[in-house]
Image: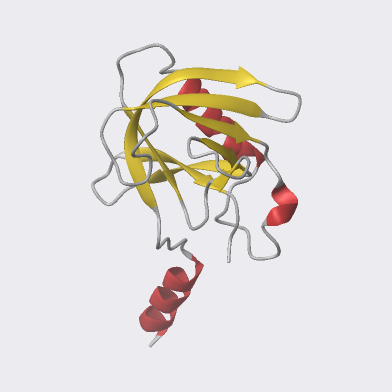
Amino acid sequence: MTKVLMALLLLSTAPAWAGGDSWAFRVRSVTPTKTGHHLVLVPAETSDRFPACPTVAISVDFQPTQWGANSASLPNEGTNREAIVLLRGVVGTPDVIRFGEMGTGLSPARQGAACDFMSRGLRILEEPNGVKAVYSFFRVP
């Protein structure tokens, strides 16, 4: 009985993600701004999410107050910084990185801007195949 309770407790505290998706990109630039960072990513594959985007621009403005009380597995200042360091490490290289969104992870920067987005936080997550990917979070249900 104790083993069953421990297993249930472990499962209830482990982060579980559903509804996320990621795509292959090359990183053209990671530029500091007054409030965060500006990313320019180049799609390395065609996707339904960014079908007409030669580049995808993302303004990352980390906002911890957006997550609410149940935020242990959501982006925090440390996870956001780790993701930025990872992205900076592949700027200008032929290396491909997975970049995705969790839930409403990217919000249009302005109406009609198909390739220009905003993010409120980044986190590196391991995908089911073991590949590490940077995920963007904007709004959490």
In screen coordinates, is 18 left or right of 79? Answer: left
Residue at the (40%, 11%) spot, across then down: 92
Residue at the (46%, 63%) spot, across then down: 14
Q: Residue farthest to the front? A: 112
Residue at the (30%, 15%) spot, across then down: 94
Query: Compared to 16, does 57 lie above or below?
Result: above
- Of 135 and 70, the residue lying toward us: 135
| Residue 119 % position (x, y) | 59, 42
Q: How is the image coloured?
A: secondary structure
In screen coordinates, is 134 left or right of 93? Answer: right
| Residue 100 % position (x, y) | 41, 43
In screen coordinates, is 49 left or right of 45? Answer: right
Q: Quadrant of the C terminus?
A: bottom right
- Of 80 and 3, the residue lying toward us: 80
| Residue 120 % position (x, y) | 63, 44
Q: Quadrant of the N terminus?
A: bottom left
Q: Residue farthest to the top? A: 92
In screen coordinates, is 19 left or right of 64? Answer: left
- Of 126 and 10, the residue lying toward us: 126
- Of 118 and 35, the residue lying toward us: 118
Which quadrant of the figure has residue 38? Answer: top right
Query: Compared to 137, does 88 lie above or below?
Result: above
| Residue 28 % position (x, y) | 44, 17
Which quadrant of the figure has residue 125? Answer: top left
Q: Give the number of marks.
A: 0
